[in-house]
Image (tube, rainbow, N blue to C red):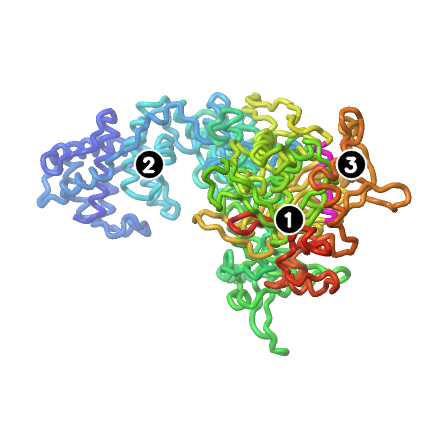
Amino acid sequence: MSAILVKIFATALTLSQVLVDPDSVKTTFDPVRDQAEVSEILKSGCTHMRRAFDIEDINLDDLIATAMEDPQAIAGDMKVLQGLSFSDLHASYRLFCKNEKVEPAPVDLGEVISYYNAAVAGLPDVGKLKGLKLPGVSVVLDGSGKRFAEVFEPDHRRIWVPLSDIPKSVQQAFVSAEDKRFYQHRGVDERGVIRAFVGNFANPGRPAGGSTITQQVAKNLLVGDDVTYDRKMREMIVASRIERTLSKAEILEIYLNSIYLGRSSWGIEMAARSYFGKGVKALSVSEGALLAGLAKGPNYYNPDTRAERTQERMAYVLSRMQEDGFLKSEQVQQAVVSLPQRVPIERTRRTTGFHFVDHVSRDARTLADIEKLTAGAYTVRSTLNPALQQAAEAALQEGLARYELSIGRQRYQGAEINLAEAIKAFEGKNDAAAAPAWRRALEAARLPLYDVHWPAAVVIEKGKDKKSGANVLRVGLKDGSILSLNAWEAARRDIKLHDVVRVRVIEQKGKGTVRADLRTPPSVQGGAVVLENKSGRILAMTGGFSYPLSQLNRATQAHRQPGSALKPLTYLAALSKGLQPNTLIWDTPVTLPPVSGEANARARDYWSPKNYDGTGSGIMTLRRALENSKNLVTARLLDGGIESTPEQSLKRVCELALEAQLYLECTPHYPFVLGAQPVRILDIAAFYAAVANEGAMPVPYAIESVEENGRAIYSRKANAPVRLGSADPAAFYQLKTMLQGVLERGTARSLKALAPFAAGKTGTSDNENDAWFVGFTNDVTIAVWAGHDNADGKRRTLGRGQTGGKVTAPIFQSILQAAWEHHAPKAPLGPPSPQAAKQLITLPIDLNTGDRLTDGQGKGFMEHFRLNWLGRLSETQFRLVPQDEAYAFRNPDLWSDGDDRGGGSQYENEGPYAEGPGWLDGLRQMIPPSRRQADPESVFRRWWDEEEPPRRSRRVDPDYFWRNGQVY
């Protein structure tokens, strides 16, 4: 027995049961014992179908006779009937439909039963459709109330509406077009099957399946859409069960909300909005008929590309509605005149904000008690600034790529796609007036990295120039321009013709566009957050280089060591205890006792940190120490600068960190003050916003409100920032001005031009595994992190000298420029608030010594001093270093400052970061002979051991982090 005949009779067995006795459908038979029962079921089914043929006025016997006389006339080009033995089929017809005895039996019922049992085993539970509400689309609005994003699951961009909201004319249009006997059949319509069967013989080019609306619900939601006999059998049984479980109204509601109708629209409501810009309630008869016509094939009857075909299909639906008695002739004539006016296609594909929208989805679950946004049609009002979001993503992507280019770690790992086949297809269309084939192919391409903001370009020429013999590599962009591609040698070798690559277009002033620089996805990752200082609104958030490459949101879901970016916390604790920015402190080696006490302590239990460059600068002010990120000074502040003992000081800093909600718990070990405990980007941004606000810390948030069908289910209450009570506004303002000096003179000196308008701090963790820059203006705080993911348990360094001042500061600068353009204009950092001003006095000092200047001593640095409760100046300059020691150590020459080289440059081949081992020795040779040390390791001898004060060493970049034997 042929395989196709087995499948046909297994399908016939299914159909016979659901038509004759749908309440008693069996899904298993014994291949031996139940053959007689199966034979009777097939005979009953055939009798039922013969009656249906009669009702449809089709003579089945004549049809069979024609098939026997000329099988090709029946089979034609229908692949499904190719290879079928019509003689066996005719014998089976005589056996089961005419009750004739046929020897030998044309059908092996044992094979049919075995196939049937396997095909319909494990049918899905139709009870899950009861009360079903399919996933829908939620809309995320930006901070100005404009539509920014849609959140929906694949194949579920819909807005669910109850059947009562769908006009009767629309309901009838779908019933007339798809299932005219919907209200009469019990899941499977034998007459519809017959009409489809006969119609397919007449028009085999576009076969019809004869499925009812109930069968389409079963296919779309329960059994899948495989084009197999197995699926059809399962579909028929499940459809019959659905009819016993749900009412006709429930079935129709599910169908109208689940069907795909083109324009990325699932369900009638979304389709009405996509095509006509209005809800389903407002659809006219002709508009409803157009949508009903699309159910058979949204692409085939696409009104945007095949208007004539769409109009024919709409006319068909209207005529069927007239046949069914729903419309009158004049209504049809009026509706069929022309296609209804449609709104332009609104492309749903966006290119920004994917990590942010994920964050919004998680927040909605917590704040509005929503399981997930796709569970319904919600409207979420967010805090996002779209222009700033795009700029932040572009800045991070370019910054990470430039970092890898600067140290030679860039790699070309292949094109996103190759357009060779697409270009060939466009060239075959021979449209002389059209754009070049490569340009049309590039415009039509859907690139995998859809959120990468470098322009896409296609390689249109690769080889040697015929005249000059030089290697030629040119690319074409979507705007039609053709540019030379600048790429490193390995990439030039691997790039293929018609590869699509990403480029950075370089323009030269006065000359326009001159070239395209190749850009590739880096292996390093990063994240950035932009907060509004006063409110805590998250204006922009990017959690990685590209969302398609990694959905992890490193701004909120990752914890990384902040390094020196955490140092302001220790300085804040010291300032709140009364120390002034001009307080002098030793930048020399220090050893702190074990936190747990010295009883039974081992040598390794003591903490002896080092500066980033392994040297020290002698005596310096707190201001200069923070500006230059001195680890030794930060450690020494624990020893009497905050509390009387290091243990108590550490506890105080931990308490401040917990109050600032940087951590849920603080690990009590000394390296904590140097940023050893990992933190989230979002949390450290909130702390710096508190510094900008003089201690008023905002709570970062991304959602203003959530609505469902116009009903508010969550609205954020306006809460004032929480004031950090452990430090007063005066201490915060002093810290703010010290962080401004980081840009003016310190480790972020490459951003000196921003110093009047911004303040911030660099951060670099152990072995340069993490690079940070966190900074703020009057209006916003920006936190940027870069580093490698540690998913494999290994920590990968960014490379020697790749500090926060070099890697992340340029990214911060780009984002800041965008914030000034798209959020709040550039303005100098504000003066102290009235509350802080009452506690402060501004006096000129010598920036290096901390000495206050009197009239006639020249113009000094204007320092902000705290006043005590009596309104008097609290002098603390010599609290930690006795005055006689400070005077004895001083040296007036320029080598005493220890910071004649600033922070990292922006990827230029200059500064200590670009030098190899031993670069410091070269700089030492520049020191005047009178100031050179015979023994470079003796820098930290006590001043009284030498005739001259010791030379303070020159700084590399004091971003740091402590580890065994070395601190960065």
Which SS class for mark 3?
strand
| Quadrant in the picture for residue 387 | top right
The kind of residue on which mark 1 rests is Thr
| Secondary-structure class at tag 2 | helix
In front: 922, or 767? Answer: 922
Type of amino acid at the residue the image marks with label 3: His
Residue that numbered label 1 is attached to: 588
Does any portion of residue 303 appear in the rendered image? no
Residue 483: x and y, percent?
A: 64, 63
Give the residue at mark 3: 864
Mark 2 = which residue? Answer: 223
Which labelled disc corresponds to residue 690? none
Q: Residue at x 74, y 54 (%)?
A: 896
Indicate which disc, 2 or 1, sits on the residue closer to the N terminus.
2
Percent from the top left, x then y, of residue 71? 25, 50
| Magenta span of residues | 731-745
Asked if residue 363 is positioned above or below residue 850 in the image, the reply reads: above
The label nearer to you, 1 versus 3, is 1
Q: Examine the residues drawn in magenta and state their main secondary structure.
A: helix
Q: Amino acid at mark 2?
A: Val
Q: Is residue 688 magenta?
A: no
